[in-house]
Amino acid sequence: MILLDAFPTSHASIGYPAASKPELIRDLATRLCGVVDVDPGDCVRALLEREALGSTGMGGGTAIPHARLAALREPAGLVVRLKKAIDFDAIDAVPVSLVCLLLLPASDASACSAVLAGVARRFRDPVSVKAMRNAVSTLAFHAAFIREPGAD
């Protein structure tokens, strides 16, 4: 599976408003669950339970809140650049401004690993992160996210 399957252009946003980590997770989960036809309550609960195990803030101002759901058949996600960075309890204590919320099917571990690894690769790649931070449009932001690191 390529990232574009899980992250069509309509699943990207810049200037996204959020005041806190729980608010952001609830808002993004509710938006995404409306698209993938999964119960928003189950989704939010699974994401917050995963977050309680340890922050998904990766460092460098990025986070990948994620959860596996039995009701989901294909990976799906939203990627956003926040209007203002928020505390995410990240490993380096740096506030987060790039967030990828990812929902994964509980039944397909290999697809889940591939998608999660692809997102993490982009958030660890300084060229990709810089392009996402500097994008002036949602289309440019999405293109920077989808682009495979080192593809130039």
Image (cartoon, helix red, strand yellow):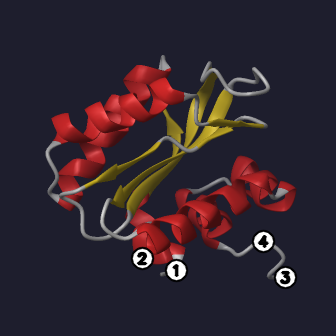
Asked whether the residues under the numbered discs 2 and 1 touch, taking CB atoms below 8 Å apart as contact, a structural biologist would say yes
Rendered image: mark on residue 152: 3
Q: Which residue corresponds to mark 2?
A: 5
Tell me residue 30's x, y (percent).
25, 39
| Circle 2 crowding by C-alpha within 10 Å: few under 14, some 14–19, many from 20 | few
Please state the total of marks drawn on the protein image: 4
**Which comes sooner in the sequence, label 1 or label 4?**
1
Distance of mark 1 from mark 3, alpha carbons? Answer: 18 Å
**Which comes sooner in the sequence, label 4 or label 2?**
2
Tell me residue 86's x, y (percent).
60, 21
Residue drawn at (73%, 47%) of the image: 133
Specify the amino acid type for callout 2.
Asp
Rendered image: mark on residue 149: 4
Q: Which residue corresponds to mark 1?
A: 2
Q: Is residue 13 visible?
A: no
Specify the amino acid type for callout 1.
Ile
Q: Is residue 130 above or below residue 52?
A: below
Asked whether the residues under the numbered discs 1 and 4 touch, taking CB atoms below 8 Å apart as contact, a structural biologist would say no
**Which comes sooner in the sequence, label 3 or label 2?**
2
Distance of mark 3 from mark 2, alpha carbons? Answer: 21 Å
